[in-house]
Image: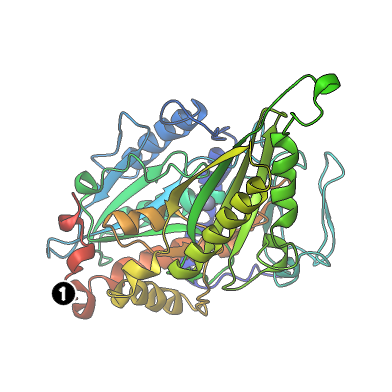
Amino acid sequence: MGAPYTSDLAAAIAPDLLRRFDRYVRIDTQSARDRTQSPSTPGQLDLARLLVHELTEAGVADAALDENGYVTGSVPGSIGNGRAIGLIAHMDTSPDASGAGVEPIVHADYDGGVIELPVGGTRLDPAAMPELVAKRGHDIVTASGDTLLGADDKAGVAEIVAAVAYLAAHPELPRPELRIAFTPDEEIGEGATLFNIERFGAFCAYTIDGSDVGELQDETFSACEAIATIRGVDVHPGHAAGKLVSALRLAAEVVAELPSDRLTPDTTSGREGFIHPYSLQGTAAEAEIRVIVRDFDEERLAEHLELFERTTRSVVGRAPRATVEVAVHRQYRNMHEYLEPVPFITDAAEVAIIAEGVTPVRTPIRGGTDGSRLSEMGLPTPNIFAGGHEFHSVREWASLQDMAAAAATIVRLAEVWTREEWAGAGSVGAGSAQAAQ
Ligand SMILES: [Zn+2]
């Protein structure tokens, strides 16, 4: 049975795409939380240097690695309207599963059954993975069972490089000026931090960092982290009667009093937000609760934060000699606010996906992307599918056919931006790169 490519274009790009993907996933680019430099880990620079080399070989004359570990390059346009379109993917992989010694395996012409990986007893069971059921006949790429694959987001990286190489080899194909960026440390929330939007100089951009074929996203969570620090009164427990106030016990009470049948990650879906305590550390003297708070709506996000703070103060208030401080910091903001005034940017991707013969699926992301912060910083950046699944786990897998569809979508997106309707489409206004400081 022939592999079900979405188009001849996707089939033509697939072999080059797979070779690049295979090279990239073997490099350990796992990022590390609480970084002291950018990128957080040296492996990311190994991939960055390889990408500069491959982009240069593909004809990108200005491919370069900057001082913070960002790879950039540009492709001249076949039209000269002074407007560049950005393509972005992240080079790092999640700290949540090992990224060392990744050995990719291609399960050609997938038969629809359970895929047993050679190491660690890891199994991909279609009964537990509805998305796998739909990929019968595809070439499924996995790791070997004890590492993640790194399709998040090396699928996106390989798709951009393969699309750029294809465009370079086919100078007759229309394209606007393209700007490429590969970011470090996205998985630890820092991908946009040192991104130089002004130097990048794009009118808008697309991250290629979504999952299933057809996904197109212009909405992410708005996200905050809150840290409550409780101070008690520590005394020798043998002489503590009437004196000891345990900060640790108060912290546990706070967590117990937060809603558990609603507003949690495991009881919410779709557009519902949550308060998620993800770390509780402490001693009788001092304890710290860390929660992430998420919602698509700014007002509801503020309500969730208020509920956390009120619960914390009320519990600690019952122990008059204890004190509490609550610090809140914003992590990223729903990109929809910035993309809604410029709908033609997301529409261009939708037209490209349809041109590739794929049905667009527009769903909000229960998470963030580099685009969440880039959009807020002045570079409107929706997110396009990359073809991977079960991210951040040893079960991570990707469909070669869906990855090829993403690469072909990039080639088609380039054409869309040369159409009169888009080449001269409205100014991005307050959200434009020019308006960014
Ligand atoms: Zn990603």
Q: Quadrant of residue 290?
A: top right
The residue that appears at 68% across and 65% down in the rendered structure is 138
The residue that appears at 41% across and 76% down in the rendered structure is 350
Q: Does 285 appear above or below 224?
A: above
x, y percent for residue 12: 48, 62
Q: Nearer the viewer, residue 155 or 56?
A: 155
Quarter containing the N terminus = bottom right
Per the image, the residue denoted by label 1 is: 424
Q: In the image, is 378 to the left or to the right of 245?
A: left
Q: Nearer the viewer, residue 45 or 267?
A: 267
Q: Does 318 appear above or below 412?
A: above
Q: Nearer the viewer, residue 202 or 331?
A: 331
Colouring mode (rainbow / by chain / secondary structure / one colour): rainbow
x, y percent for residue 299: 45, 69
Which residue type does callout 1 highlight? Gly
x, y percent for residue 411: 37, 64
x, y percent for residue 273: 58, 66
User: Which class describes the residues within 10 Å of circle 1: few (<14), some (14-19), or many (20+)?
Assistant: few
The residue that appears at 60% across and 73% down in the rendered structure is 270
The residue that appears at 50% across and 69% down in the rendered structure is 300
